Image: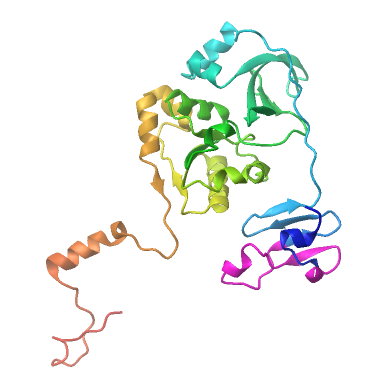
C-alpha cells in the first residue's frame, strides 16, 4: 500500500499536514453525511475515523518475532496446582501449548518463573503473554498484537471473545473451542490494534459472543467491540450475580453452567426496531379489553366514533 488513493482517502481536502475530512467508509451511512470524522496526518501517513474506528498507516509496520526459548519439559507441580484452583485441566493446558519458564518481569524488576500464553497465527508464534505469580503481565516488546487462540476461529462462523486467556481456557475446558481472548485485557486508552490485525477473521462471522468481565473496564471494552463489529452480530453473556467472568462461573458452578450462560446469550436491541416482547403487554391488554379511549371531542355525537389520542 503506497499512496492515499489506494485506501480511498482524498488528501486534497486536508488543509495543511493534518486535519479532519469525510470518511469514505462510513460518512455516506450517517445522518450527518458532511460531518468530518476522519483524522488524517499526511506527514506520518496515518488515519483514524472517530465514528467507525477505521484506521491504518501507509507505512508497513515491522513487528518483532518472539525468541523461542528452551521450555521446561513439563509444567511444574506449583503451576498445575494454580490451574487446578481455576478448574483448568492438564489436558487443556497441553492442548493450548501453555509453557513455563524464566523471564525478566518489570513488576519485580528481576527474572522470575512465569506462565507463558503463546499466541499463534497459522501455527506460527506471533507473541507471548508472560504472567508471574504476583499478577505481573507483559507481552513481547514490539511484537504484533493479535487475539489469543486465533487459529481456532479461522473457519468458524461464530466465536466468543473473552477479556483474558484464563477465561478463554475456561470455555475450552468445557469443550467450546472457538473462543479467543484479547491480548491486553480491558486496557485503558482503547488500544484495539489486535482487531485491525485480525479483521479478516471476522468477515465471515455471523455471531460474536462477548464474554468480557462484568465490571466497568469490561463493559467499556464490550461497548468498543460492539461499535467495531455492529449490534447485529454481537450477543452478550450474562453471568450469575456472584460471578465477574467466565472463569468465576466455571469455578463456582461448573462446565454445564458456563455452557448454559453461553447458550442463553442475548442479542442487542437494534436502533429504531420495536420488538414484540416490548409491546406484548399492551397487545394483550387491547385484545382483552379493546382499544383504550382517548380524550373527548366535547361533541356527544362524535365521541362514540372518534376521540383524541394525545
- The C terminus sits in image quarter: bottom left
Compared to residue 88, the image places residue 141 above or below, namely: below
Q: Nearer the viewer, residue 25 or 275?
A: 25
Residue 83 percent location from the top left of the image: 52, 16
Looking at the picture, does residue 269 appear above or below residue 108? below
For the record, the magenta segment spans: 12-38
Position of residue 139 in the picture relative to residue 3 (left or right): left
Q: Is residue 21 magenta?
A: yes
Q: Position of residue 54 (x, y in %)?
A: 66, 55
Q: Which residue is found at the position 63% from the left and 34% from the top?
A: 183
Q: Identify the residue shown where x is 54% and y is 26%.
A: 166
Q: Does residue 219 show up?
A: yes
Is 9 situated above or below 157?
below
Question: Image check: 6 left or right of 163?
Answer: right
Q: Quadrant of residue 137?
A: top right
Q: Would you identify the image quadrant in which residue 288 lies? A: bottom left
Amino acid at each position: 500500500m503506497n499512496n492515499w488513493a489506494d485506501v480511498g482517502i482524498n488528501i486534497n481536502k486536508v488543509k495543511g499536514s493534518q486535519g479532519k475530512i469525510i470518511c469514505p467508509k462510513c460518512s455516506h451511512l450517517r445522518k450527518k453525511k458532511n460531518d468530518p470524522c476522519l483524522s488524517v496526518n499526511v506527514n506520518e501517513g496515518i488515519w483514524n475515523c472517530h465514528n467507525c474506528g477505521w484506521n491504518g498507516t501507509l507505512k508497513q509496520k515491522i513487528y518483532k518475532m518472539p525468541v523461542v526459548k528452551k521450555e521446561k519439559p513439563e509444567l511444574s507441580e506449583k503451576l498445575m496446582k494454580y490451574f487446578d484452583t481455576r478448574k483448568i485441566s492438564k489436558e487443556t493446558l497441553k492442548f493450548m501449548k501453555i509453557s513455563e519458564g524464566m523471564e525478566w518481569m518489570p513488576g519485580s524488576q528481576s527474572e522470575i518463573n512465569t506462565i507463558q500464553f503463546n499466541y499463534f497465527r497459522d501455527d506460527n508464534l506471533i507473541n507471548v503473554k508472560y504472567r508471574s505469580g504476583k499478577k505481573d503481565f507483559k507481552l513481547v516488546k514490539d511484537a504484533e498484537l493479535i487475539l489469543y487462540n486465533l487459529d481456532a476461529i479461522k473457519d468458524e462462523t461464530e466465536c466468543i471473545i473473552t477479556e483474558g486467556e484464563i477465561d478463554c481456557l475456561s470455555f475450552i475446558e468445557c469443550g467450546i473451542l472457538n473462543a479467543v481472548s484479547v491480548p491486553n485485557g480491558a486496557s485503558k486508552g482503547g488500544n484495539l490494534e489486535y482487531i485491525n490485525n485480525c479483521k479478516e477473521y471476522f468477515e465471515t462471522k455471523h455471531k460474536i459472543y462477548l464474554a468480557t468481565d462484568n465490571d466497568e473496564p469490561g463493559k467499556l471494552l464490550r461497548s468498543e467491540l460492539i461499535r467495531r463489529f455492529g449490534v447485529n452480530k454481537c450477543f452478550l453473556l450474562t453471568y450469575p450475580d456472584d460471578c465477574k467472568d467466565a472463569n468465576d462461573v466455571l469455578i463456582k458452578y461448573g462446565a454445564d453452567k458456563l455452557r448454559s450462560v453461553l447458550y442463553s446469550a442475548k442479542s442487542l436491541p437494534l436502533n429504531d426496531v420495536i420488538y414484540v416482547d416490548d409491546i406484548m403487554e399492551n397487545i394483550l391488554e387491547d385484545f382483552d379489553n379493546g382499544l383504550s379511549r382517548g380524550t373527548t371531542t366535547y361533541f356527544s355525537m362524535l365521541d362514540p366514533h372518534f376521540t383524541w389520542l394525545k
